Image (spheres, helix red, strand yellow):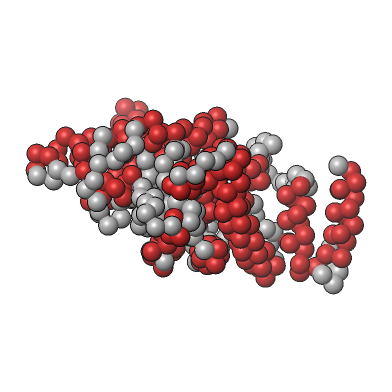
Amino acid sequence: MNWIRKKIDKVKEPFQPGEKLEKFAPAVNALDTFLFVPNDTTKKGSHIRDAVDLKRTMITVVLALIPALIFGIWNAGYQHYTQLGEEFTFIDAFLHGAYKIVPMIIVSYAVGLGIEFGFAVKRGHEVNEGYLVTGLLIPMIMPVDIPLWMVALSVAFAVLIGKEAFGGTGMNILNPALTARAFAFFAYPTYMSGDKVWVSEATEVSGISGETILGTLAAGKDVAYESASMFSGLIPGSISETSTALILLGALILIFTKVGSWRIILSGFIGAAVMGLIFNFLMPAINLDNALTNFPWYNHLIVGGLAFGVVFMATDPVSAAQTMKGKWIYGFLIGFFGIMIRIFNPAYPEGIMLAILLMNIFAPTIDHYVIQANIKRRQKRMKVQTVKTA
């Protein structure tokens, strides 16, 4: 690796302080810190010395996403050939999915990193590694055939309005990937919902229906899929949101590396289960009996984007609650409201995106009241101690 180090040092010479290309140094330094550990060290004060930095944290999340991404690429081809009724091999399905999805990933990174590099140069600060995850998440939560220019616009909106407007990495109040999806959903609803957007090239062939399970239930129909298919992910849906099994594998990676909060993940599923049970047992008694309320609560946990959202979106350390008790409350309410929106809004039978964005806004409020409760409890304890001492 020494020769790479020497090459990069040579390239960086015109960008050093005092040189003519100094203002473009953040763009070159981004490549350096991507390949090598940053050589900046703390100068004073006490610090915890640890090998974990932002780059390693982001790479860990990317690794956790890879199983769901690979399956999503293959499933895109599988759904395409299955709907057509053609014979196909594993390679055929994977290549078709890659043909559709890899360009989306390239566009996401090109547009997002281009904007971030521009802001870094303009503001004179280093490029942060936060977009390594966001750039991959955005294509993974989109329909397979969404036009690339829509992906580019959604990315630009998410980075400019959802992130840089608040000061960049670490300052955003909303999850950038979900901000991109929300923009695409409300700006181009016909490309983000319906019967055919979830299966590759379904709109080009008459008679093909790629309606999701939640879409089928919202229309008052019974679903033809078994729980095993729902859990494994062999169903139509957003690119990487269908396989709960591989999403949970990613959750284990995040939990064991302590990158993702197990409290948020667990409480998110608990909240969803509680709301699912409420609808299963109480709604028929008040004449709100329909396909979505009758859908078993445990199946609510493994369809749609709930699992993916709870594991990879709700655990975003910037936009989530920060206190321990706050994480329990935050995660529970995401799952609780996610199922509530899913069932009460048949026009939009997927509520996890709105639930997470809503709780992103309320996360600081949750932390505030948790901290205030701790302060009041300690003040009360101090008063008791003062009385006993006196």
Looking at the picture, how far across and down is residue 68, in whole percent? 53, 40
Residue at image location 85% in from the left, 72% down from the top:
20
Image height of 246 relative to 210, above or below: above
Residue at image location 64% in from the left, 43% down from the top:
59
Residue at image location 13% in from the left, 45% down from the top:
288
Q: Quadrant of the C terminus?
A: top left
Asked if residue 174 shows in the view, the reply is no
Asked if residue 140 lies left or right of residue 62, the reply is: left
Looking at the picture, how far across and down is residue 176, in whole percent? 50, 57
Looking at the picture, how far across and down is residue 196, in whole percent? 40, 55
Residue at image location 44% in from the left, 38% down from the top:
234
Single out the residue that lies furthest toward the left: 286
Single out the residue that lies furthest toward the top: 388
Residue closer to the observer: 23 or 134: 134
Asked if residue 1 lies left or right of residue 348, the reply is: right
Q: Quadrant of the N terminus?
A: top right
Residue closer to the observer: 284 or 163: 284
Looking at the picture, how far across and down is residue 104, in whole percent? 58, 57
